Amino acid sequence: MRTPALTLLAILGAIAGGAEAADRDVTAHLQHCADCHGADGRSSALPANGRIAGQHREYLVYILKQYRTGGIRGVNSGIMSNAVRHLDDADIEAIAQHYSTLP
């Protein structure tokens, strides 16, 4: 069970990570994401690819890291693993921050 102090530290860490991510230029990475998920992240043209706009930042970070390490198996896992394998943690945080703020 987490103590209130540990919970506060986790929250502050998440906020700090989000702020740092907002300053990182990931324009080229976002274009790569847009190739399948659409520029707005809504996957309007290809609904099977999944909507990433408006997802929780923490979820996007988690799932991208899972794809990067090969921790997810399935229909699109090869495509996604290949798409994110070169991203570092800061890139993933910035991408997640971007898509989490979209409607």
Image: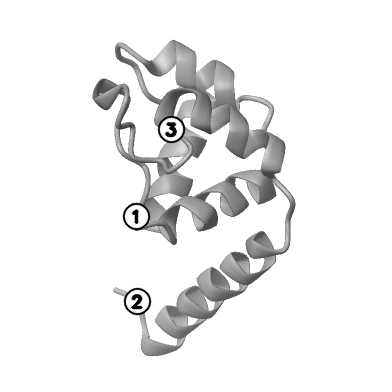
Tell me the quarter of the image containing the N terminus.
bottom left
Please tell me whether residue 89 is drawn above or below residue 31 in the rendered image: below
Residue corresponding to mark 3: 38
Residue corresponding to mark 2: 2
The colour mode here is one colour
Q: CA distance from mark 2 to mark 1?
A: 28 Å
Badge 2 amino acid? Arg
The residue at the point 51 percent across, 37 percent down is: 65
Residue corresponding to mark 1: 54
Q: Nearer the viewer, mark 3 or mark 2?
A: 3
Q: Secondary structure at mark 3?
A: loop
For label 1, count other residues whose C-alpha is less than 10 Å away and answer few (under 14), some (14-19) or many (20+). some
Asked which quadrant contains residue 84, the reply is: top right
Decide: marks 3, 2 in contact (CB < 8 A)? Answer: no
Task: State the image coordinates of residue 2 (x, y, percent, origin top left).
Answer: 34, 76
Badge 1 amino acid? Gly
Farthest-out residue, left: 48
Asked which quadrant contains residue 30, the reply is: top right
The residue at the point 31 percent across, 38 percent down is: 51
Decide: marks 1, 3 in contact (CB < 8 A)? Answer: no
Closer to the chain start, of discs 3 and 2, is: 2
What number is the disc on residue 68?
Answer: none
Closer to the chain start, of discs 2 and 1, is: 2
The residue at the point 47 percent across, 14 percent down is: 79
Closer to the chain start, of discs 1 and 3, is: 3
Q: Secondary structure at mark 1?
A: loop
Tell me the quarter of the image containing the C terminus.
bottom left
